[in-house]
Amino acid sequence: MITLSHCQELDARDPLAHLRARFAQPSEDTIYLDGNSVGAMPADAPQRVQELMTRGWRDARRRGWSYFDWMEKPWLLGEALSHLLGARPQDVIFSDNTSVNLFKLLAYACKLQPQRPVIVTERYNFPTDVYIAEGLAHFLGGKLQLRLIDHPDELPSALGPDVGVVYLSHVDYRSSYRWPMRQTSALVHEHGALAFWDLSHAAGAIEVALEADGADFAVGCGYKYLCGGPGAPAWLYVKPEHQEKDWPVIAGWMGHQDVFAFAPTYEPLAGVRRHLNGSPSILANQAMSAAADLWKLIKPEDLGAKHRSLSELLVQLLQERCAVLGVKVTSPLDYSQRGGHLTFSHPGAGSVTEALLAHGVVSSFRKPDSIRFGLSPMALSHVDVWTAVDRLVHVMESGVWQEPRFAKVSV
Ligand SMILES: Cc1ncc(COP(=O)(O)O)c(C=O)c1O
């Protein structure tokens, strides 16, 4: 049986343990296992934003563009993240949100091979991913089609000479199934298509290697495991060889070769920065800079090892202590097939999630019977995982989750 002291020993050996002190503790006694929705707040984020409000907005105003790094932040943040994505610093930028970045890069990717007008994706990909692809096809009035697969095994037979882009979430937002990026990108390339990945449930949680694993395009959220704050800008990556093949889909002035020349016609900036379009979200970027300074302290292999350790621990604890109480781990049991969170089922999952909340554990419920625990390797300890499972055991063993006050389930 796994003991609390075993978890304490794991924490004592944790190379990322020092990062926990760099996050603010919430005002309530909470173990936050929903970092796959909104990640933890770096302790100095409020002060950084406050400083921008006073020195930047109140005092400098327009002069802030030259006094501070407002213009440069989209690529400075990208540089800070790049090693955790396995990308070169100059190949990543932050801008817009994930949905907009999906649209910008998907349309760009499709245009690279117009003779291949089919996008392959999963029917149950995260909704915005599917909607963006549907919307693009709709916008193009039938010149582009979607081919939807229901299971990873169907991918090989969906590939053909008409497929231009295979567009997948690296980690499934419900089951946490992780596609093998290297083998999948290689398969996609063998069939002449481009590999497009959404890493929203991977970046900042597990080790990824975009360049080595053959990603042509990638995007991801800034507010989940990357801890950039609610509504934080998202990131995008373009493989070097594709960066200058075409104009960006949104040819805005911030992606112009010489922004302040106010030239009458568009000339794209070199490299991935051409996908910037309008003014950056300066306040949001400032909040995220606190997290970016933490990313810089992390070795990708340490992030991966810590996440694996948390994730394996959670599986073991759930199996040892909760299986008899009706819990079944539904995420893949092989760690290499799992992403940031772990999903398990219980017949009363909605009410259990509500009862857990009242017992100081924030997690998320997905209909009909799934609970997701998001495991942030930056902000969580092994003891947090142990405590959360201990509270889960209490909630289920005592039957407290069946009380009427937990019948109304919020999503
Ligand atoms: C896999 C995935 N892609 C995209 C999004 C949406 O991102 P955004 O709100 O930044 O458009 C989410 C949000 O949870 C997500 O899980």
Image: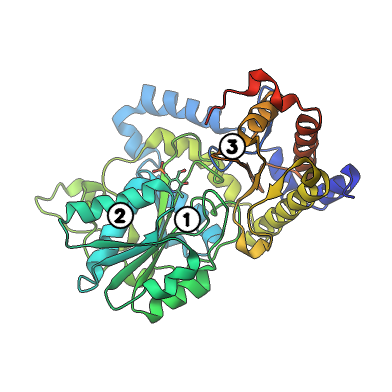
Identify the element where label 1 is drawn.
helix
| Quarter of the figure with residue 133 | bottom left
Amino acid tagged 2? Ala
State how far apart marks 3 and 2 are (Cα): 27 Å
Asked if residue 212 shows in the view, the reply is no
Image location of residue 289, percent across then percent down = 50, 41
Which residue lies most toward the top here? 405
Instruction: Please tell me which of labels 3 and 1 falls first in the chain.
Output: 1
Give the x, y percent position of residue 262.
Answer: 15, 46
**Image location (x, y in percent) of residue 309:** 74, 55
Residue 46 visible within the image: yes
What separation in Å lies between label 1 and label 2 (alpha carbons)? 28 Å
State the residue in front, 309 or 89.
309
Residue under the point 81% across and 27% down: 398
Alpha-carbon neighbours of circle 1 within 10 Å: few (<14), some, or many (≥20)?
many
Q: Amino acid at mark 3?
A: Ser
The residue indicated by pointer 2 is 133
Tag of residue 79: 1
At 43% from the left and 49% from the top, the residue drawn is 126
Q: Quadrant of ligand 1?
A: top left
Q: Which residue is mark 3?
A: 364
Which-is-in-front pick, marks 3 and 1?
Answer: 3
